[in-house]
Image: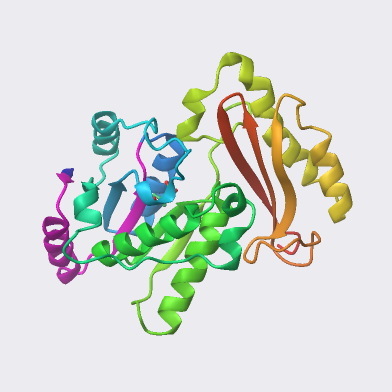
Amino acid sequence: MQLIHSVSELRQLISQKRSAGARIGFVPTMGALHQGHLSLVQLAQQRCDFVVVSVFVNPLQFGANEDFDIYPRTLGIDANLLSDHDVDVLFSPSPAEVYPASSPVKQLTAGAIGEKFEGESRPGHFDGMLTVVNRLFDIVEPDCVFFGQKDAQQVALVKQMLSEQISSGRRAPIELVVGETTRNESGLALSSRNKFLTAQDMPAALSLSKALFAGEKGSTRQQVLELARAEISPEAKLEYLELVDADSFEPTEPGLTRAALIVAAKVGEVRLIDNVYIDRKS
Ligand code: PAF
């Protein structure tokens, strides 16, 4: 595996690989890698010839009172893990490489979908996320990108951004692949922030996935939400629990469109999100 910090070095290498006919896969991350990221790496390796994983803790997607300063940074461990999994390149740029002072990077706005749910709790988060994802796509120019379902609203926004850019001819086609959420044996969705959960927080943290699994059995919107709500621990400070269309994030009924049952809650000091897709047609 090659560890690359510079945009120009990465571009040169990818351009050589592309000229040799390689299909380029890209897994963007903020590091502190866990099995969920590795499952995306595996998907990328199955579908692509050359796999680039980025580790960049993007300051633009953190609010002033959020956990940017304490977000886990474990580059050495991440590099060993990716090397053990035969990743071709770990791209770990500095903020100055991603956002060079000499040529300002295009700032994106996430629009209506970006203002709901996660966007309401974390104003500006999705603008910062789309800005860095767009910039990373410009740098890597991948054929295929891999995102985890756990961040379902992020997935909807990246899908919308790509569809607008590709249909207007501003970007060459990129296939977006969504990897299923990886869970521990108790059902907790893996997240880099789980390391901040204490043993005491665990029952409340687990109540989120229990709620989703109970809710998905409901056949009407009301039933889905009631079944889910009944499982949420009183120790979890619920921020939202909703059944939405997985693309528009508008409230929906199960069976009408591909739906996502989404939840966010604060457990102890940790803000957790999770979701399940409910696709009654398939
Ligand atoms: O999902 C994440 O880890 C981040 O939002 C991403 C896509 C790497 C952009 O910083």
Quadrant containing the N terminus in the rendered view: top left
Residue 111 versus residue 191 in the image, above or below: below
Give the residue at x 44% y 42%.
64
In the image, is residue 152 above or below residue 247?
Answer: above
Q: Which picture quadrant has residue 57?
A: top left
Q: In which quarter of the image is the C terminus?
A: bottom right
Splitting the image into 4 quarters, where does residue 67 fall? top left
Decide whether residue 199 is among the magenta residues: no
Image side of residue 164 versus residue 252, left or right: left
Q: Where is residue 197 in the image (x, y as percent from the top left)?
A: 54, 22
* Residue 8 sits inside the magenta stretch: yes
Residue displayed at 84% across by 34% down = 230
From this view, report whether residue 107 is shown above or below residue 185. below
Residue placed at 54% from the left, 48% from the top?
122
In front: 220, or 170? Answer: 170
Q: Give the x, y percent position of residue 248.
A: 64, 66
Q: Residue pushed farthest top?
A: 200
**Count of numbered circles in the view:** 0
Residue at the image position 42 percent from the left and 47 percent from the top:
40
Measured as percent of width and height from the top left, residue 82 is found at: 28, 38
Name the foreground residue: 15 vs 165.
Answer: 165
Colouring used for the render:
rainbow
Q: Which residue lies furthest to the bottom in this view?
A: 168
- As drawn, is 43 to the left or to the right of 266? left
Say if 231 sits above or below 135 in the image: above
Q: Give the range drawn in magenta.
A: 3-31
Residue 157 rendering spot, x and y as whole percentages: 52, 63
